Image (tube, helix red, strand yellow):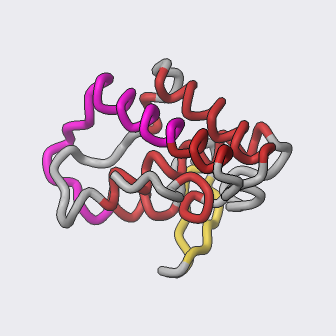
Amino acid sequence: MDMRLEKDSMGELEVPSKALYGGNTRRAQLNFPISNLRFGRSFIKSLGLIKQSAAETNLELGLIEKDIANAIISSAQEVIDGDHDESFVVDIFQTGSGTSTNMNVNEVISNLSILKLGGEIGSRNPVHPNDHVKKGAII
């Protein structure tokens, strides 16, 4: 399997090269293989709606640039429509407050947005999963 190297505040980690999720999601996948159960379609759709609404609000308030907001809104719509359900890989049972689930959706939408804007998947540029996708949309 081809892998890419992702770097974040927790260090470096190999992630499948074509995966839309990133290092945080991959860590959760490796560290918490509790039940092998995944979230259902309605829950994933809800995550997309939350992130899309936050991006629309952030655009309206001038908190993120128009091109980034529009890429997030469009990418969130793909999540809402079920186009990338296979990218939601964290176990339904997890430790903590759902951080792994939140980061899974943030990373998927961020990477979709990066691709729309001509960037490289996993680069966190020009759309960062925390600084842009998560802004005002913590689940």
Rendered residue at 57%/58% (across/down): 129
Task: Specify the principal SS of the magenta part.
Answer: helix
Q: Is residue 61 above or below residue 27?
A: above
Q: Is residue 90 above or below residue 49?
A: below
What residue appears at the point 66 percent right and 44 percent down from the top-left corner? 60
Left or right of residue 63: residue 95: left
Magenta highlight range? 30-53
Left or right of residue 71, residue 78 in this image? left
Horizontal and vertical percent position of residue 49: 44, 32
Please identify the quarter of the rendering in which residue 103 is found: bottom left
Residue 137 location in percent, x, y?
Answer: 44, 52
Seen at 74% across and 47% down, the residue is 68
Q: Position of residue 84 (x, y in %)?
A: 50, 28
Quadrant of the rendered image containing residue 113 = top right
Decide if residue 101 is in sight here. yes
Is residue 31 found inside the magenta-colored segment of the image?
A: yes
Residue at the image position 71 percent from the left and 61 percent from the top: 123
Q: In front here: 19 or 69?
A: 69
> Foreground residue, 10 or 47?
47
- Going by the picture, which residue comes out furthest to the top? 81
Residue 34, horizontal then vertical, whole percent: 15, 53
